[in-house]
Image (cartoon, rainbow, N blue to C red):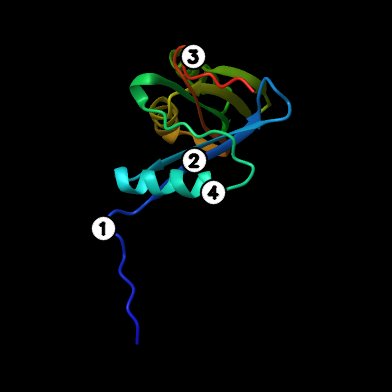
Amino acid sequence: MSQACLPAAVTILASITAGVTTDPRFTRITIVTEGDDDIIEQIVKQLRKLVDVIDIKVLEDATSVSRELVLVKVRVEENQRQGVISMADVFRGKIVDVGTDSLIIELTGKQDKVDAFIRLLGGYEILELARTGITSLERGSDGVLYL
C-alpha cells in the first residue's frame, strides 16, 4: 500500500479572470491565489509549461493596482430605497437599474471594499449577486511587454 503526503501549505484559488488586451491576438488571465513562496513558484513553473503562455508576472500588492466589479440586486421597499442609495454613494457605487421592488448596484474596488459593501447589505435581501473576480496591472511602464 502506498501513502501520499499532503504539502504543508495548501494552495487556495481565490479568483481567475480573463479578457482581451490592447492587442486582440492576446488574452490576459489574472489568477489570484494564496500560498507560500514554494507554492507560488510551483504555479509559475506549471504555467510556463503551457504552450500558449507568453509571459507570467507575479504581482505584489505594493507594486500593482487590483480591482473587482460586483453587481448586486437588492430587494427594497420604497421606504428603504434612499438608505440603500446612500450606502451605495458612500462606497462610490452606482445605481444601474431601478425596479418597482429592487435596485441593482454596480461597485468597483479592491476586494476588501467589495466584501465590506456586501456585508453592509446584510440587513437587506440580496436577490442576485455577480462578481467578476480580481484583475490587476503592475504600476508604471517598466514591466510592459511589447510583442
Q: CA distance from mark 3 to mark 1?
A: 41 Å
- Frontmost of labels 3 and 1 is 1
Q: Is the residue under label 3 in contact with that under label 4 (CB below 8 Å)?
A: no
Compared across the picture, whether 127 is left or right of 63 comes to: right
Q: Earlier in the sequence, mark 4 or mark 3?
A: 4
Q: Name the mark nearer the viewer: 3 or 2.
A: 2
Q: Earlier in the sequence, mark 4 or mark 2?
A: 2
Query: Residue 15 — which label?
Result: 2
Are there few (<14), some (14-19), or many (20+) residues within 10 Å of tag 4?
A: few
> What residue is shown at x 46% (from left), y 14% (from top)?
142
**Mark positioned earlier in the residue sequence (1 or 4):** 1
Please name which of the two marks, 1 or 4, marks the residue nearer to the observer: 4
- Please tell me which of labels 3 and 2 falls first in the chain: 2
Residue 116 lies, with reference to residue 39, above or below; the image says above
**Label 2 crowding class (10 Å Cα cut-off): few <14, some 14-19, many 20+?**
some
At mark 4, the secondary structure is loop
Contact? badges 1 and 4 (CB < 8 Å): no
What's the distance in space between the residues labelled 4 and 2, CA to CA?
Answer: 21 Å
Secondary structure beneath dot 1 equals loop
In the picture, measured across the screen, residue 55 lies left or right of residue 35, that is right
At numbered mark 2, what does the secondary structure look like: helix, strand or loop?
Answer: strand
Q: Position of residue 79 (x, y in %)?
A: 53, 21
Q: Amino acid at mark 2?
A: Ser
Taking the image as shown, residue 39 lies to the left or right of residue 16, namely left
Q: Quadrant of residue 120?
A: top left
Is residue 98 positioned above or below 131 on the image?
above
Q: Which mark is residue 8?
A: 1
